[in-house]
Image (tube, rainbow, N blue to C red):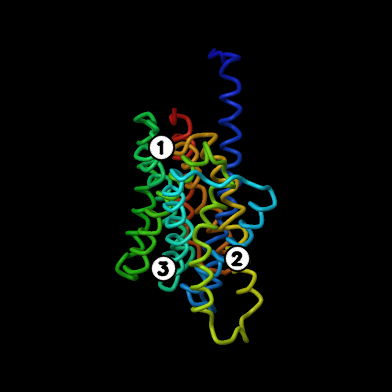
Amino acid sequence: MERTSPLNTPVIAKSNRGWLNGFIGVLIFSGSLPATRVAVLEFDPVFLTVARASIAGVLALCLLWLFKERRPARGQLLSLLVVAIGVVLGFPLLTALALQYVTSAHSIVFLGLLPLATAVFAVLRGGERPRPVFWFFSVLGSLLVVGFAASQGLSASPRGDMLMLLAVLVCGLGYAEGAKLSRTLGGWQVISWALVLSLPVMLVLTGCLAPATFTGISRSAWLSLAYVSLFSMLIGFVFWYRGLAQGGIAAVGQLQLLQPLFGLALAATLLHEPVSLAMLGVTVAVILCVAGARKFSR
């Protein structure tokens, strides 16, 4: 029977905490696309993007001031800019645009590509080197997702699918860059400083793009805006970046393969969107890939 050295116990405990924090982050992110789908029915997608970043940015600024956090070093600003472009602007904007052409249930399946994108950027930016078997499970999970999308007929909305693919790429880069920076700056501090860095531009754009009147905006749209601003843009990243930094970017990043399961359940429950047996089958298959990727991540 394999023994665990006492010296390795703190490392294992830290890794387990990383998986737990990452799991909580994925649960929170799972509501992002359904909430965005509801919001873009009544808000312009570009306005929604800058408004959610502005709200989260103001909250982040208050948190940084309240806890008297030190300012990032000059050498960390470029990484923070990459995080801001990837997860503050890029992913929210591209997904909001995509959801004008595809349902949230369809777009959620594309999130199965995020673990592979995150793992690739973990190697390029984080210096991680997962074992070969890890890549087998990571690629297999992604191929299952792509195969499902192709079986549904990409020609039905190539623009929506292309926007989702671009969103996955910029998000994977933002995740890996932010997790790398979290090791020195702290998890919630990274997303907070990225939000604050982009806040001046976001506030100006929010004022310029705001509709002439908000009369007629439903309660569900306002609640969706609140969710993507508070949870998707801030609270979720507190757990997510901490989990990636503790458990490894490539390894914990595979938890994103679970996001379609939770997202599809929300889409079916809250939005009454159809969820086919094929969607459920793909989701179950990628869950098995998560288990395999975790086993061989180191």
Q: Position of residue 277 (x, y in %)?
A: 47, 57
**What residue sits right under mark 2 in the picture?**
55
Residue on which disc 1 sits: 126
Q: Nearer the viewer, mark 1 or mark 3?
A: 1
**N-terminal-most mark, 1 or 3:** 3
What secondary structure is found at the residue carrying circle 3? Answer: helix
Does residue 246 sit above or below 72 in this rendering? above
Front residue of 84 and 298: 84
Split into 4 quadrants, where in the image is the N terminus? top right
Report the residue marked by disc 3. Answer: 98
Q: Does residue 3 sit above or below 89 in this rendering?
A: above
Please give the name of the residue rendered at 62% of the width and 57% of the height, measured from the top-left corner. 61
Q: Secondary structure at mark 1?
A: helix
Tag shown at residue 39:
none
Residue at 66%, 57% in the rendered image: 62
User: Residue at position x 56%, y 66% from top?
Assistant: 54
Q: Amino acid at mark 3?
A: Ala
